[in-house]
Amino acid sequence: MIQTVKLEKAALKLLKNNLKIQKNEKILVVTDRKNCRVCNAVFRVSQGFSKNVVAVHISDKRSNSGPLPKLKQLFSSVDVIIAPTTKSISHSPETRVARKRHGVRVASMPKITGELFVKAFTVSVAQQKAINGRLLKKLRGKRVRVTNKSGTDLTIGINKQKFDSDDGDCSKKGSLRNIPSGEVSAAPISDVNGKLCIDVWNGHLKPKNIKLEIANGKIVGYSKEAAQFITYLRKNGECATYVVELGIGTNPKHRKPIGNILHDEKILGSAHIAFGGFGNLRKCPIHEDVIIMKPTIQVDRKTIMENGVPKW
C-alpha cells in the first residue's frame, strides 16, 4: 500500500504544478468511493491552500460521465473541481457547464489508484506539453487512417477538427485535464468508417475477437464475441453505439496496459476510440473508451506512428 506521505506529496504537486491553486480559491473534491485515500490526501493538502474546501460523495451507480443534476449549482460555484472517482465526471453535462460558462478548472481522475496517483507526476507538465505539441503539428490534415495487426482499419475525417492536448496543465480557466495526463484527442467526431478490433476494454486486457464494423460513425455490425460489449453500450441508449472521440496516447512512462483505462489510454504507442457522449456537444449517458494497441497512424497518407512507434 502506498504510504500516506507519498500520496500527500503527489497531491501537493497536483495543486502547485498542475492546477496552480491560488490562495483561498474554492476547491471541490468529488468522489464516488468509500475510504478513498487519494481523495483524503487531496482534501487534507487542499486545506493548506484554502479555507474554502468542500468534499462531496456521489453515487457509484451512474455510467461514465453520466449526469449529475443535483450538483449543477455546486459545480458552477467553485474555482476548481478535483475528482478521484471510479466513474468519470469528465464529460458530464454539469461539468461542461461549469467549465464553459463559469471557467471552473477540472482535474478528473476516474479509476485512479494510489500507485497511479504517485506515478502521475513523474512526467512534468513541460515535458508532456512538448511531446503533445509535436504530435499536434502532425495532425494537420483531412483524414486519419488507423490500422494494426489485430485487424483495426479505420478512416476518420479530421478536416477542421480541433484536437485537444491533455498535457496536465490545468491552470487556465475552463480547462479539463486527466491525471495522469498524456493524450491528444478530437471530439465529437462522426466521420468514421471501417473496422475496429478492441485490444483493451474496461479491465479486459486481452478481449478475444471483439470486432466492430463502423459506418458513418455508428456501429452497424459486430462479431459474436462483441455481443457483451454491445449490450453494455445499448443499456445507455442507441446513442452509445456512435463514435464520439479519437485519441492518441502520449505519456512516455505508460508502456503496457494494466486494465485501467485512465492509464491505458495514455500509453505512448496506443490510440483509443470512445463511444457515446461528450458533454452538451453530444448528449448520451455514457462515454466509453476502448484501446487500439501498436497502431500505424497516417494523416493524409503520411505515417506519424508505425506499429506503435511515434514519428514525431
Image (tube, rainbow, N blue to C red):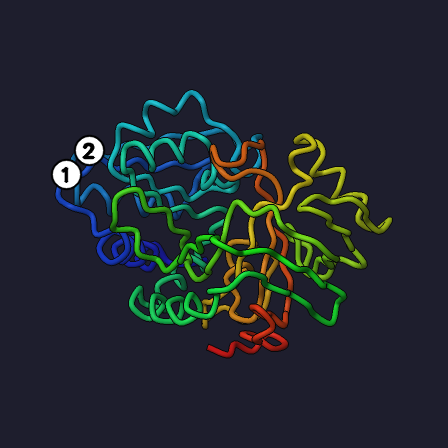
Q: Secondary structure at mark 1?
A: loop
User: Looking at the image, which residue sits at the far top?
Assistant: 70
Q: Nearer the viewer, residue 193 or 114?
A: 193
Q: Residue at x 42, y 65 (%)?
A: 136
Q: Residue at x 50, y 62 (%)?
A: 266
In the picture, residue 116 is in which quadrant? bottom left
Give SS at disc 2: loop
Q: State how many labels appear.
A: 2
The Cα atoms of the two marked residues, 1 and 2, are separated by 6 Å
Residue type at the position of mark 2: Asn
Extreme left residue here?
23
**Frontmost residue, 105 versus 25:** 105
Query: Mark 2, residues whose alpha carbon is within 10 Å: few (<14), some, or many (≥20)?
Result: some
Residue in front for this viewpoint, 131 or 157: 157
Q: Quadrant of residue 28?
A: top left
Q: Earlier in the sequence, mark 1 or mark 2?
A: 1
Residue type at numbered disc 1: Asn
Residue 87 versus residue 3 in the image, above or below: above
Q: Any mark on residue 24, and which?
A: 1
Residue occupying image coordinates x 34% and y 55%: 7
Q: In the rendered view, does 23 fall on the left or right side of 261?
A: left
The residue pinned by badge 2 equals 52
In the current view of this chain or complex, which residue is farthest to the right?
224
Q: Residue at coordinates 68% horizontally, 30% vertically from top-left?
A: 237
* Percent coordinates x, y for residue 228 in the rendering: 78, 43
In the image, is 88 to the left or to the right of 240?
Answer: left
Badge 1 vs badge 2, beta-carbon distance below 8 Å: yes
Q: Which mark is residue 247?
A: none
How many residues crowd mark 1 within 10 Å: few (<14), some (14–19), many (20+)?
some
Task: Pinpoint residue 55: horizontal percent, then vertical percent.
Answer: 33, 33
127 or 41, nearer to the observer: 127
